[in-house]
């Protein structure tokens, strides 16, 4: 008898989180509030997990451990969303990333992959398959639209149809088996900086850094050894340096082989940072160390004299999707500050090897998750940052952080609503830093629909510029990118105007 498709009756797959499992095309989304600026011409691409088939593990309520449930949130197959802006109109398209994993499961009509990144829990049919879901981020560089996840190579998609093309290893120039989901694109040179962690295989301490020019040629490759087999989800470009944070969310291969989680939090270990000149070698790396904390994302980083400054989404309790290795429970949060908060990390190139951490935002600002900046200023001194902010009732809103004044302004999406990562869009090609809009994907849990909200990036607490309705649920998206029409046509990533910092 054929195996029936039936999802377990747990919150992960109920209510707003019920799997959608469908591709869609909608021309002229309804504008339910305000007016879409006619000068906003380009495409917002977003990427997130959508569950193709019920998970192999924990099919009953009783044996579905909540940590496994959190993992499953990250383990869905990649779904890419395209919002096309043209002269005040917005069209929507979604498509699966039809990579090797997706196609194999489509053929088998069931899930073939087990716990998050744990190949030892996979079906035997998946033994030789690439396990990546391609579900984390989507970027445009050197004329290619790339769907990314850190356990696989980029997957190229057609920027208009979203048709899946092929893996991208840059004509064999990338020898690591996978690349980061968080490359940094230098808006001055248009070069892409990227890397692989555990680059010699699961549980290894090998790191590989790559720099890719505007033609898709790899112009730098540096391998070095990490302090432990860490999760290095995000990293920083700061002027002429790349900076890697090694937070003690560590892979123990013996635990993985026994069917356990791919990562465990080691609060007894230290956090380390490696500072590598972009034209340097492994021998040029400067190392810094300090007490354990986890930095999920980098808002931005820059060089200030002989110091490197990073604004980091900071937690001193690890990451709640993965357990403490010593069995201690994850502390129940009483506020968003207990989960993540924005911290400024300083690495003094002339002042020893200690990591300096400072919290500069007002107490209770509850800000510091999925942080972003104006992408045209990545790696450079900047003023404006954007982040999720937890509002009363554990409701995710959006915050604008003015690093010059210290002011934090927030937008409340309303009851029963949750915001995803904000993406900045310049108002026009020569717009100053922060002059433009935030595009925010908002899940309306009570109405079972998703809105795309356009906010004034410097007046986020005001009325939205426009609210555009998607007449269906988009369960979750992690990260996204804006590509203006001129950059899409030219194959370029960003145009960076002169700023006050360049003077």
Image (cartoon, rainbow, N blue to C red):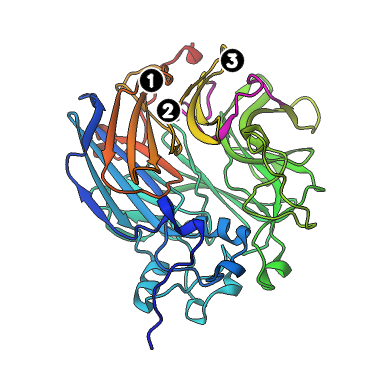
Where's residue 79, x and y in %?
37, 54
Q: Nearer the viewer, residue 501 or 109?
A: 109
Decide if residue 86 is in sight here.
Answer: yes
Q: Residue 238 lies in magenta, yes or no?
A: no
Which of the numbered marks, if any, corresponds to residue 376? 2
**Secondary structure found at label 2:** helix
Decide if residue 348 is in sight here.
Answer: no
Q: Are marks 1 and 2 in contact (CB under 8 Å)?
A: yes
Name the residue carrying label 1: 497
Name the residue carrying label 3: 406
Which residue range is magenta in the image?
A: 358-381
Q: Earlier in the sequence, mark 1 or mark 3?
A: 3
Q: Is residue 75 left or right of residue 18?
A: right
Which residue is at a point 49% across and 76% down the rendered structure image? 126
Q: Nearer the viewer, residue 75 or 483?
A: 75
User: Image quarter for residue 119?
Assistant: bottom right
Please determine whether, in this image, residue 222 is positioned above or below residue 29: below
Q: Residue 366 lies in magenta, yes or no?
A: yes
Where's residue 308, x and y in %?
65, 27
């Amino acid at each position: 008898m054929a195996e029936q498709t039936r999802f377990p009756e747990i919150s992960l797959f109920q209510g707003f989180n019920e799997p959608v499992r469908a591709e869609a095309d909608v021309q002229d989304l309804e504008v339910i509030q305000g007016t879409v600026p006619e000068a906003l011409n380009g495409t917002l691409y977003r990427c997130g997990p959508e569950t193709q088939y019920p998970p192999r593990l924990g099919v009953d309520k009783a044996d579905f451990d909540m940590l496994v449930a959190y993992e499953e949130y990250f383990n869905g197959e990649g779904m890419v969303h395209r919002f096309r802006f043209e002269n005040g109109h917005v069209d929507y398209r979604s498509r699966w990333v039809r990579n090797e994993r997706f196609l194999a499961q489509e053929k088998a009509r069931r899930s073939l992959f087990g716990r998050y990144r744990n190949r030892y829990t996979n079906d035997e049919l998946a033994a030789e398959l690439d396990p990546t879901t391609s579900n984390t981020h989507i970027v445009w560089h050197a004329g290619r639209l790339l769907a990314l996840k850190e356990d696989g190579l980029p997957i190229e998609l057609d920027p208009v149809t979203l048709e899946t093309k092929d893996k991208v290893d840059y004509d064999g120039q990338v020898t690591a088996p996978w690349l980061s989901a968080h490359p940094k694109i230098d808006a001055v040179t248009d070069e892409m900086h990227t890397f692989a962690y555990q680059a010699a295989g699961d549980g290894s301490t090998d790191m590989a850094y790559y720099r890719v020019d505007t033609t898709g040629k790899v112009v730098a490759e540096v391998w070095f050894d990490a302090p432990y087999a860490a999760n290095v989800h995000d990293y920083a470009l700061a002027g002429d340096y790349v900076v890697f944070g090694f937070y003690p969310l560590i892979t123990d291969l013996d635990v993985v082989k026994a069917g356990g989680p791919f990562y465990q939090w080691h609060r007894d270990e230290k956090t380390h940072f490696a500072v590598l000149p972009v034209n340097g070698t492994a021998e040029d790396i400067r190392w810094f160390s300090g007490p354990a904390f986890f930095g999920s994302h980098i808002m931005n980083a820059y060089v200030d004299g002989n110091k490197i400054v990073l604004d980091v989404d900071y937690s001193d309790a690890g990451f709640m999707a993965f357990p403490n290795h010593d069995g201690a429970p994850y502390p129940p949060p009483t506020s968003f500050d207990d989960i993540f908060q924005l911290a400024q990390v300083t690495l003094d190139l002339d002042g020893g090897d200690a990591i300096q951490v400072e919290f500069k935002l007002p107490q209770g600002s509850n800000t510091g998750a999925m942080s972003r900046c104006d992408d045209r200023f990545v790696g450079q001194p900047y003023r404006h940052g954007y982040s999720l902010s937890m509002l009363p009732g554990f409701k995710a809103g959006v915050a604008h952080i003015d690093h010059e004044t210290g002011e934090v302004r927030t937008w409340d999406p309303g009851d029963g609503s949750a915001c995803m990562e904000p993406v900045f869009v310049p108002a026009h090609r020569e717009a100053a830093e922060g002059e433009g809009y935030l595009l925010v994907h908002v899940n309306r849990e009570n109405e079972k629909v998703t809105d795309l909200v356009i906010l004034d990036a410097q007046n986020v607490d005001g009325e939205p510029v426009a609210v555009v309705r998607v007449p269906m649920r988009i369960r979750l998206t992690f990260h996204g990118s804006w590509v203006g029409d001129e950059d899409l046509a030219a194959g370029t990533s960003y145009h960076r105007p002169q700023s006050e910092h360049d003077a």
